Amino acid sequence: MAYPLPVANVRLKNLTKQFDGVTAVDGVDLDVADREFMILLGPSGCGKSTLLRMIAGLEDPTEGEVYIGETMVNDVLPKDRDVAMVFQSYALYPHKTVQANIEFPLKVRKVDKVERAKSALAAAESLGLGEYMSRKPGALSGGQRQRVALARAIVRKPAVFCMDEPLSNLDAKLRGETRAELIALHQRLESTFIYVTHDQVEAMTMGNRIAVMSRGKIEQVGTPQDVYDRPASVFIAQFVGTPPMNILPAGSIETGKHLVGVRPEHVHISPEGSLAMTVTLVEQLGHELLVTGRVGERRVVVRQPAHSVVPEIGAEVRIVADAADLHRFDPVTELRIDI
Ligand code: ATP
């Protein structure tokens, strides 16, 4: 069942959080559109959870403002913000049944008992939990617990869902399935999702846009394809994409003073190649072959089609890339240069 949810855009202005001298979030400006699926992506410690917690009202900003729709919500309590938070740890009450867990946010809001039960069942059924209503969380699988946490968020009919690494406790297969469920849920609910992850596959597959964070700042905001095709810095080039983009020193692949980046799928092994690479590792993945080697001091990975000739470890091969596939970065700032 689809809920007639309120909708809202989220605007962050110069949002900053300091903890005892540590700047966790540093002057972040971000506009999340109404009904957008926005991913906050970055490595551990970059400040993404703190940013999300400030949006949900679980952390007070040191500076800056959070707007939901047209309203500045800095002084609005979390429960009054129209934001639901889903945590990695699920944060379910172990002694309450699935039904009581899902109903809890409505109970806090003093919703009538019959209405509560009806809404909880609708949310549970929309996530395939209808038959587990009388179980306790301890008698559920990790994936089912995560769905209870989602149902508890849905039941509030919030304008904004904030999710902090909700899939990281699930095994790889379940993570893949739950990813697909979340995409479907976003489409069904038509509400704004802000989703924190350090997993670039989640970011690429789920987000309408990705905001890539590093050391408390947002370094780039764009669609997944934009960020992959035109990374704004060496850091992003190597964080988004598996295996990461190869970065070669200035002068090695073309003349000039820029660092040169090239994705593994854009490097080819060819006798006419201009660069010599010493092979150090060959990984046969079935659908493709990854050949890793050294060019001078740099590690380079080449993605080859399945059934390509497998080079010997220690062999010297020649590699080549099309000029159109090269990315250039400033050697000092490591920021992208478009020429
Ligand atoms: P992770 O993926 O590991 O959760 P993150 O990107 O979500 O990382 P945050 O949890 O937002 O990062 O933390 C950002 C920085 O702020 C880190 O250096 C962290 O140690 C620090 N920090 C976070 N919470 C607190 C706190 N309550 N007190 C002091 N420092 C904190």
Image (tube, grey):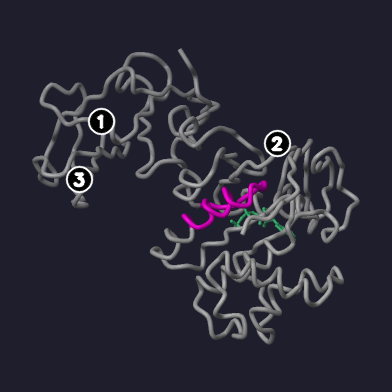
Query: Residue at position x 54%, y 79% from top?
Result: 131
The residue under the point 58% across, 51% down is 188
Ligand 1's quadrant is bottom right
Locate the N terminus by quadrant: bottom right
Disc assigned to residue 325 = none
Are dots 2 and 1 in contact, CB under 8 Å? no
The magenta stretch spans which residues?
179-198
**Quarter residue 8 falls in:** top right
Q: In the rendered image of this protein, does residue 112 appear above or below residue 281? A: below
Mark 3 falls on what kind of element? strand
Q: Could you say which disc has been placed on residue 289 in the image?
A: 3
Q: Earlier in the sequence, mark 3 or mark 1?
A: 1
Q: CA distance from mark 3 to mark 1?
A: 12 Å
Q: Is residue 332 left or right of residue 107?
A: left
**Residue 186 forms part of the magenta stretch:** yes
- Is 192 above or below relative to 87? above
